[in-house]
């Protein structure tokens, strides 16, 4: 892989699954495992299922929140079943691979997997640029966590193997100019500032926020803002707040 | 799947893996499981890992030899690590899918998976038309049995979905939900409104506009806003202007 992909597991219940994920990742030549508040880790069951990929378990990075685990990432993709109430850009694993594959290796990419029984929350999904859905049997759709990681990492590896043969025809990704992309942490600061300003101008009612912030997140995340664009937007928010203080 | 694919497991040691295979198959909408001389079957561990795919375990066909399990098949494919001493036609899972997908459903196809530790014997591999190799990490190449079945059945399902529903899987453009994209005229009204509001809050100096509007246009145009998103943005601009009039 020329790209820099981390696998993030949120709130995993069974440590055996963490081991199975480590094995699946290493089989596909991925190394970077992040764990958000795992129920039991480290654990003998994780080591057993890892079957020789225990090095990934030893180097796993553990965080308390998803926000921390993805703060330095430029592209965040969450796994999701279909049919969330606010539609979001959804890709299948092959489309995901075609998005990820041309990205240069200084950019950091997170693919986030939720809980065994309930997946990711809406709030967690709203941190993501894209959602990825494995097109499983509609009437038996829930894959084992390690199996889902296996499918995604397999697609990423296939795409990298196929595109290594095809370096010159790389499609562009993100912005094709020389300003750095905003990181997930930059964007979260922007969204916090935006939310506060919308409250200040009486557009957002904190008692009844409806889907305003998710809609705005979805809109801005789709364009992968660069750092200057984020400063411009924050400048507009600051200017707005300054006008309110005058009054 | 329009094609008729059975998964054949040869001499499986751990019954939990048979359950994991059943789950992986059912997730990808395959039903036909054949077992050649499993070490322990039926078994509680198989039921547990099947997680709701026990119907496949109940209908599994058990044979003593691989020859019997594939006797009525028209195409037999064996999973294999690289480097057997007699070269054989080897495909990757995607190439396998492209071979299998156009086959009509009266033809029977077997994909054969070997033992957890040693795979298929040379004699067993020589029963096969093709060998399929999952292009795993050369230095950590052995997938869990259920993970290998997951990858192969996933590829077969993707191929069938892409070819059955070519229309729906056309590359996406714009938003992939059911709200109409904003027209160019909608967007121009938005940008006019935005420019005026930025002048009102003293962020944009009409005497020295620099590259502010082009930057903002580029940012919003990249996300192909839908009509609701444009209304939300214009709502924010109107709310901002209303606050200014208060002062």
Image (cartoon, coloured by chain):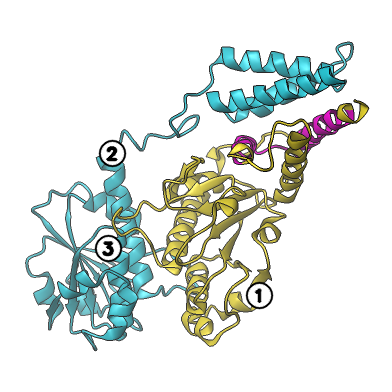
Chain colours: A yellow, B cyan
Residue visible at 56% across and 56% down in the picture: A111
Q: Does the magenta portion include A40?
A: no
- Asked whether disc 3 touches disc 2, contact meaning CB atoms under 8 Å apart, the reply is no
Report which residue position mark 3 lands on.
Answer: B26
- Asked whether disc 1 touches disc 2, contact meaning CB atoms under 8 Å apart, the reply is no
Labels 3 and 2: the sequence-earlier one:
3
Residue visible at 55% across and 48% down in the picture: A100
Q: CA distance from mark 3 to mark 1?
A: 34 Å
- Tell me the SS state at disc 3: helix
Select label 3 or label 1 by which is in front.
Answer: 3
Q: Residues within 10 Å of mark 3 (few under 14, many from 20)?
A: many
User: Outermost residue toward the right?
Assistant: A246
Q: CA distance from mark 3 to mark 2?
A: 20 Å
First to last magenta residue range: A214-242
Q: Position of residue A83 (x, y in %)?
A: 42, 46
Report which residue position mark 2 lands on.
Answer: B165
In depth, the one of A201 and A141 nearer the eye is A201
Mark number displayed over residue A59? 1
Is A146 left or right of A188, judged from the image as shown? left
In depth, the one of A20 and A87 nearer the eye is A87
Q: Chain of mark 2?
A: B
Please indicate, yes or no, whether residue B93 appears anywhere in the rendered image.
Answer: yes
- Tell me the SS state at disc 1: loop
Q: Residues within 10 Å of mark 2 (few under 14, many from 20)?
A: few
Please indicate, yes or no, whether residue B82 appears anywhere in the rendered image.
Answer: no
Q: Chain of mark 3?
A: B
Q: CA distance from mark 1 to mark 2?
A: 42 Å
Select label 3 or label 2 by which is in front.
Answer: 3
Q: Chain of mark 1?
A: A
Residue A199 position by quadrant: top right
């Amino acid at each position: 892989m020329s790209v820099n992909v981390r696998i993030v597991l949120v709130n995993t219940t069974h440590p055996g699954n963490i081991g199975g994920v480590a094995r699946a990742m290493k089989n596909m030549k991925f190394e970077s495992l992040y764990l958000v508040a795992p129920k039991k880790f480290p654990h003998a069951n994780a080591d057993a299922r890892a079957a020789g990929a225990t090095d990934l378990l030893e180097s796993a990075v553990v965080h308390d929140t998803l926000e921390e685990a993805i703060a330095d990432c430029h592209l965040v993709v969450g796994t999701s079943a279909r049919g969330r109430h606010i539609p979001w850009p959804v890709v299948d694993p092959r489309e995901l691979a075609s998005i990820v594959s041309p990205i240069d290796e200084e950019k950091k990419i997170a693919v986030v997997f939720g809980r065994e029984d309930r997946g990711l929350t809406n709030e967690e999904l709203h941190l993501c640029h894209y959602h990825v859905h494995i097109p499983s049997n509609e009437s038996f759709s829930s894959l084992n966590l390690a199996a889902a990681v296996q499918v995604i990492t397999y697609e990423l590896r296939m795409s990298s193997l196929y595109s290594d043969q095809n370096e010159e025809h790389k499609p562009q990704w993100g912005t094709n100019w020389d300003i750095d992309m905003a990181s997930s942490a930059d964007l979260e600061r922007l969204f916090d500032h935006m939310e506060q300003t919308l409250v200040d101008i009486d557009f957002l009612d904190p008692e009844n926020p409806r889907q305003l912030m998710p809609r705005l997140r979805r809109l801005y995340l789709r364009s992968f803002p660069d750092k200057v664009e984020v400063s411009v937007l924050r400048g507009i928010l600051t200017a707005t707040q300054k006008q309110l203080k005058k009054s």
